Image (spheres, helix red, strand yellow):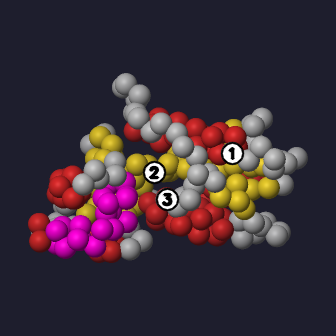
């Protein structure tokens, strides 16, 4: 059996390695699927992340045609405020706009994880409530100057400097980082069954 992570994210790589701790001789390949991440008309945030996780897993499978018995994991994370998906910022001004919206409010981080072997496909959705403290424009500008928010959904990373703004979290911390460990292990156990 060959495990494949359809992501080049260092955070997902670390979490996938953690998820496989109880599997003898666990190792995995990494591939970088290229899919269209445009939301569909009237698609809910939850449906969106599940669809993208499945599409990433399926696209990842196509990238490893020579691997026998490949089990491919795809994942997608979106930051959602009042039903609206807040993606990765386009530029510094967009990052500031996103962080101002999150300041002093509770938002949801929706992370979907999906796994396929080409015959079977399974997915799980994990929703975590994250509450930000109130942050000033000066703090936002200082944070944006670090460049950390620029490649992250919702313009922050909870596992790094952005964690300084997180007042409370209700749900899975690892899902906010990018891969829900419990749900990932559940999918791995399903896929490992004969």
Residue 193 in view here? no
Determine the CA span between mark 2 and mark 3: 6 Å
User: Alpha-carbon distance for marks 1 and 3?
Assistant: 22 Å
Compared to 130, does 158 lie above or below? below
Secondary element at image label 2: strand
Front-most of residues 174 and 36? 36
* Disc 3: which residue: 178
Q: Toward which corner of the image does residue 16 lie, by quadrant?
A: bottom right
Is 140 located above or below residue 187 in the figure? Answer: below
Quarter the N terminus occupies: bottom right
Residue 63 - label = 1
Above or below residue 129? Residue 139 is below
Region rendered in magenta: 139-157
Report the residue at 74% width, 56% height from top: 3
Residue drawn at 52 percent across, 61 percent down? 9
Left/right placement of residue 130 relative to residue 145 reads right
Crowd rating for badge 1 (residues with CA inside 10 Å; few <14, some 14–19, many 20+) = some
For residue 1, say whether it is visible. Answer: yes
């Amino acid at each position: 059996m060959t495990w494949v992570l359809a992501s080049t994210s260092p955070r997902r790589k670390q979490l996938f390695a953690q998820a496989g701790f109880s599997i003898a001789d666990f190792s995995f390949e990494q591939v970088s699927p290229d899919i269209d991440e445009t939301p569909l008309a009237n698609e809910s945030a939850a449906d969106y992340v599940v669809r993208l996780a499945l599409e990433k897993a399926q696209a990842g499978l196509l990238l490893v045609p020579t691997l026998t018995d490949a089990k491919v994991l795809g994942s997608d994370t979106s930051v959602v405020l009042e039903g609206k998906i807040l993606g990765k910022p386009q530029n510094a001004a967009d990052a500031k706009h996103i962080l101002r919206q999150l300041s002093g409010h509770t938002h949801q981080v929706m992370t979907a994880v999906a796994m396929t072997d080409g015959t079977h496909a399974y997915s799980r959705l994990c929703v975590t409530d994250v509450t930000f403290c109130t942050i000033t424009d000066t703090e936002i500008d200082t944070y944006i100057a670090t460049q950390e928010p620029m490649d992250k959904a919702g313009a922050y990373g909870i596992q790094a400097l952005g964690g300084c703004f997180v007042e409370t979290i209700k749900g899975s911390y690892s899902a906010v980082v990018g891969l829900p460990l419990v749900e990932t292990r559940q999918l791995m156990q399903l896929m490992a069954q004969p």
